[in-house]
Image (spheres, coloured by chain):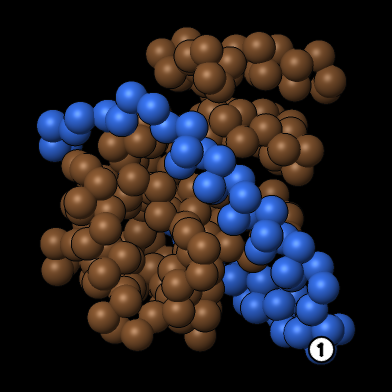
Amino acid sequence: MPNINYMKNTRKFWKAREKARAALDKKRATVSYTEKAKIAEKLHSDANFLKSGRIASAKS
Amino acid sequence: MGLRDVLVNLNNLVTVGVIQDYAVGGGYAVMYYDIPISTFDLDVLVVLSNDEDFHKLYEHFRKKGAKIEDVYIYINNMPVQFLPSYISPLFNGAIEKANIVEFEGIRSKFVSIEYLVVLLLTSFRLKDKIRIQSLLDKANKDLLLDIIQRFDNAQHQLYEKYKEVLEGT
């Protein structure tokens, strides 16, 4: 891991993150039924892909 | 095009040196740990040293013509939010201790269940609380408490939130 100088004030980052997430949620909630069906289909496909995953190396 | 292509893209970012390392967190990591949820975006924790490197990451995608909206970079039509490690030691720890997972010949890194719970404690929206409750059954509680204690601070109040979740279960 590199030597990282952590930011002292991160409130701006967290605020921008939450604002963007809320905007995306709102945008998705207002899409058409056709679009919602496409999203659901993609999510289903991604879920199946994730199920194929096997841990190759774990750290505790 | 789906998650597979996005993971290939993320691995490529490491290969070309735009990021040093990464680990998937957020809703997709919750899904990986077999909790059925609905999510739209992909949270990716990335090892970057400073703001300048973070800017370079956005420039990399801008030059490739990727759609950038708010903090999201659209990779293969998926909104991806990059969380740079210099923001928080918690992000750095989560990447360092992430599991290497193999999907159909593609290797990727996903944050561990315990780190995932702590990351969800930082957001702590209603849906995060529900996700935490589902993940707790699978988590190593001693390890989880150790991570909470190591990264707790006045801003996130991780232990207080953890207690609140436990009281609600």
Query: Quadrant where the C terminus of chain A lies?
Result: top left
Q: Residue at x 73, y 55 (%)?
A: B37
Tell me the amino acid under the disc marked 1: Thr
Residue B105 appearing in the image: no
Residue A47 x, y percent position in the rendering: 63, 66
The answer to whether residue A23 is left or right of residue A9 is right
Taking A47 as reference, is B136 above or below it? Answer: above
Determine whether, in the image, residue B75 is placed left or right of residue B128: left
Q: Residue at 71% of width from left, 77% of height from top? A: A39
Chain of the residue on which disc 1 is drawn: A
Vertically, is B94 above or below B77? above
At 17% from the left and 36% from the top, the residue drawn is A1
Q: Left or right? Give the position of B128 relative to B108.
A: right
User: Foreground residue, B133 or B121?
Assistant: B121
* In the image, residue B131 above or below residue B22: above
**Chain whose colour in the figure is blue:** A
Observer-nearest of A9 and B10: A9
Front residue of B143/B124: it is B124
Q: Which residue is mark 1?
A: A34
Task: Please state if B105 lies on the left or on the right of B111 as rendered.
Answer: left
Residue B14 is situated, as x and y percent measured from the top left of the image, at: 21, 61
**Chain ID for brown:** B
Q: Who is closer to the viewer here, B53 or B158? A: B53
Q: Report helix, strand or loop for mark 1.
A: helix
Give the number of marks.
1
Quick check: A16 above or below A49?
A: above
Give the x, y percent position of residue B160: 66, 12
At horizontal 29% and vertical 83% (from top left) the residue drawn is B64
Q: Position of residue B143 (x, y in %)?
A: 47, 18
